[in-house]
Amino acid sequence: MQPQGRPWARPSADVLENARERFSRLLGAEGVQAEGPLFAEFHDPFEGPDAVGHQPSLVVQPASVEEVQAVLKLATELGVHLWTSSMGRNFGYGGSAPVVDGGVVLNLRRMNRVLEIDVAQGYALIEPGVSFAQLYDALREQDAPLMMSVPDLGWGSIIGNALEHGYGYNVMGDHASAICGMEAVLADGTLLRTGQGALPGSPLWACHRRGYGPSLDSLFMQSNFGVVTKAGLWLMPRPEIFATGTITCQGENDIAPLVDMIRGLLREGVLQGVPMIVGSPDDVDGEEG
Ligand SMILES: Cc1cc2nc3c(=O)[nH]c(=O)nc-3n(C[C@H](O)[C@H](O)[C@H](O)COP(=O)(O)OP(=O)(O)OC[C@H]3O[C@@H](n4cnc5c(N)ncnc54)[C@H](O)[C@@H]3O)c2cc1C
């Protein structure tokens, strides 16, 4: 069933009340938030005190793939909009606030298991609620000779960040490219595994990206075609040493030559990580840095 009226309209109070009751029956009280401090986390933290629009009506937090499938089927039946997040901390980009006012936030924080760390093949199989900090701890706990890439903030979801084309700085810093094999739930509740994962029990799911026919992984990145419930993540061997470097430009005129220089070093393989050019509001010798 499609939402009534304008496709982007806030659902009516009756529809939302019914949705709250039905989602609560499905997930229990623990899986549905409609008020309180946890619910408040799913607003845009930078929206300001008088914000209108983009307000969630409910937050639903399934704890298993089967519950995600059931949530999607129920949302379709009720005609409510879902807005998916993994950790829901995409701060600076709207946080977990839904595009459609009154949308139901489908948040996957409760699905937070590191399902597998394969040291020999160099990958981890993770759920969407696994944060960068959590995987780091899991790798250190078993003293795995593996290194992961992290963005500036460690509390984000690895899967959420990769699906949004996030970046870190080391060799695996293009996070979308470090994903190999996904499991996604489609709008009608169908479960789909990409690549070699289409073969039941395939040991190559998180190792070999190509399957038979077209590769589907990118369909689920920066899109709303499915809810990703698992992904393989490639990790690099932990190096004996690594070095980072910083170059400070004194003025705007230095930036174009810097880009040319970095391009050359990248193409020659001298720079192996992801270089980042950032501006600073600090006044450097009277110029904007
Ligand atoms: C100070 C600061 C520094 C930052 N530094 C960096 C940085 O260095 N690198 C960087 O990449 N980002 C950076 N960010 C941006 C952002 O905070 C991170 O990318 C963060 O990891 C995203 O939050 P999240 O993982 O909780 O994403 P989520 O909010 O969980 O997800 C983001 C979006 O991805 C989609 N999505 C998430 N999960 C799923 C799923 N399971 N299925 C389908 N779609 C899904 C949804 O559209 C969702 O809105 C920074 C932000 C700030 C404020």
Image (tube, helix red, strand yellow):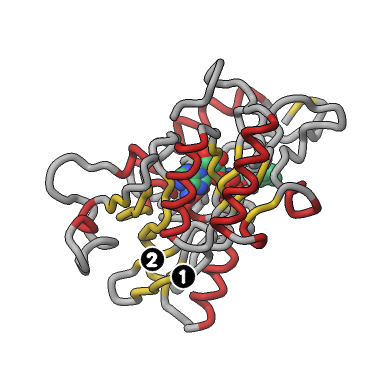
Q: Which residue is the site of mark 2? A: 125
Please name the residue shown 80% across and 52% down the image: 36
User: In the rendered image, which residue does mark 1 sit on?
Assistant: 114
User: Which percent across, then down, holds residue 142?
Assistant: 48, 83
- The answer to whether 265 appears left or right of 243 in the picture is left
Horizontally, is 51 left or right of 3 in the view? right
User: Can see residue 275?
Assistant: no
Mark identifier at residue 246: none
- Disc 1 + disc 2, Cβ < 8 Å: yes
Whole-percent x and y of residue 68? 46, 53
Residue nearest the observer in this picture, 200 or 245: 200
Q: Foreground residue, 15 or 89?
A: 15
Task: Give the CA distance from mark 1 to mark 2.
Answer: 6 Å
Residue 182 in picture, x, y percent from top left? 34, 53
Identified at 45% across, 74% down, the residue is 240
Q: Quadrant of the N terminus?
A: top left
